[in-house]
Image (tube, rainbow, N blue to C red):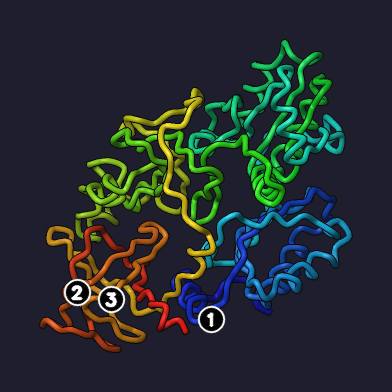
Amino acid sequence: MQLYNTLSAEERARLIDEAGKERLTLSFYAYAKIEDPKKFRDDLFVAWNALDALGRIYVAHEGINAQMSVPADQFEAFRNTLEVYDFMKGIRLNVAVEQDNHSFLKLTIKVRNKIVADGLNDDTFDVTNKGVHLKAQEFNNMLDDPNTIVVDFRNHYESEVGHFEGAITPDVENFRESLPIIKEQLQDFKEDKNLLMYCTGGIRCEKASAYFKHQGFKNVFQLEGGIIEYTRQIKEEGIDSKFIGKNFVFDHRLGERITDDIISQCHQCGKPCDNHTNCANDACHLLFIQCDECKAAMENCCSTECLDTIHLPLEEQLKLRKGLQVGNKVFRKGKSDALKFKNSGDLPKTPLAKAETKNIRQKIAVKKVLVGKAEHYFSKSKIGQFLIENKEVSVGDKVLISGPTTGEQEFIITQIYANGGPCETAKLGDQITFEIPFRVRLSDKLYKILEPAENA
């Protein structure tokens, strides 16, 4: 019985593209008493693997916390796998505002001590005595009440790109840090103020609202379903958004736009920007905000030191990080002396710029076909090398290069060299090179964007 992944992320991405089916990115959570989390985990893996469901899921004695990607045509079958458990009957599934077929490329279900690391001793208070859940319009109405204090229970790198108007945004790196800080800040308002809280999908507020009621706060409220559900409701019901900017998400998209307001800056040049990236240096992987111009100039790196490192031979890079906790083992959360324009805690109250809004349906309508994979990047000459594994690609074709660090970059090929010489069309098995204005990596894939006539 298969209870673990057998495919790499790259292999899974290729299969998703070949299948040509739309996928849904969604999240959900439930607090419940689970006697045997290990058996629960194994049963879920078997059921979800059969449906080609992917994602990152934590289970514990206290419940489940999941962020997932599910084939759209298997959505009801997936829901049925939840309904067999009494505590998940009728559970709310928060479907993402923007969809991306590559949001998750593995099915990872881990058994943890807690589904959210909060540092609390749950035996000291009643975790079921939660705050009042508010829907989007109710939340907006309470925000307008001058007797309300609204608190963001997310981390600094999340609130920096988007938050509710007037919210307290603690300068913290995790949920555990935020609880004592907020408790201290709000000591004088226990009796007479409305304590209004929110987070990404609602799970952090479930525990936080009970904790603050235990601490003596009389009027505690929370946004039902978090920012994700709030966004769905305001779009469906035509409600004005009091959330400004982007909602940070924990898949490879790193954010989905709620309004066209940009409230943050590129951490390197200060230009209005709210696109997160992970440093390309495998010994760093710092999460930070980087504009397109700095991304090209710095090749997705957070500092000149990291830029120098990625140009070293691979053997030297491996020696530098030998024995260190680096790369995917550490999630570095965007604080570094090299980031001159990083803001934490005290955030702008007005937008710095407006983003170009894109029609989500138009994004879904763009069709592409996998052509090949990256093999090398010659940084000095800015030349990328690819192996053609599927279809053909020609001079004049519009292509897309996509990868976890590179993101999605579109451009038109103006010249191709295949197997050492110039050519007009590269075919299956050809090793090709062409000029690329940005760094590519071994995990990147090359796609040809199909014209409408080719989509038919």
User: Which quadrant is home to the N terminus?
Assistant: bottom right
Quarter occupied by residue 377: bottom left
Residue drawn at the location 17% of the way across and 61% of the way down? 382
Is residue 115 among the parts visible in the rendering? no
Q: Position of residue 413 (x, y in %)?
A: 23, 72
Residue furthest out toward the right:
86
Decide which of tag 3 and tag 2 comes sooner along the chain: 3
Label pair 3/2, CB-CB below 8 angstroms? no
Position of residue 314 in the picture relative to residue 96 (left or right): left
Is residue 180 among the parts visible in the rendering? yes
Position of residue 80 in the picture relative to residue 53 (left or right): right
The residue beneath circle 3 is 397
Decide which of tag 2 and tag 1 comes sooner along the chain: 1
Label pair 1/3, CB-CB below 8 angstroms? no
Which amino acid type is shown beneath numbered disc 1?
Ala
- Mark number, residue 19: 1
Residue drawn at the location 55% of the way across and 36% of the way down? 244
Q: Position of residue 41 (x, y in %)?
A: 72, 63
Q: For the residue labelled by badge 1, is the local secondary structure a helix, a strand or a loop?
A: helix
Residue furthest out toward the bottom:
428
Q: CA distance from mark 2 to mark 1?
A: 28 Å
The residue beneath circle 2 is 433
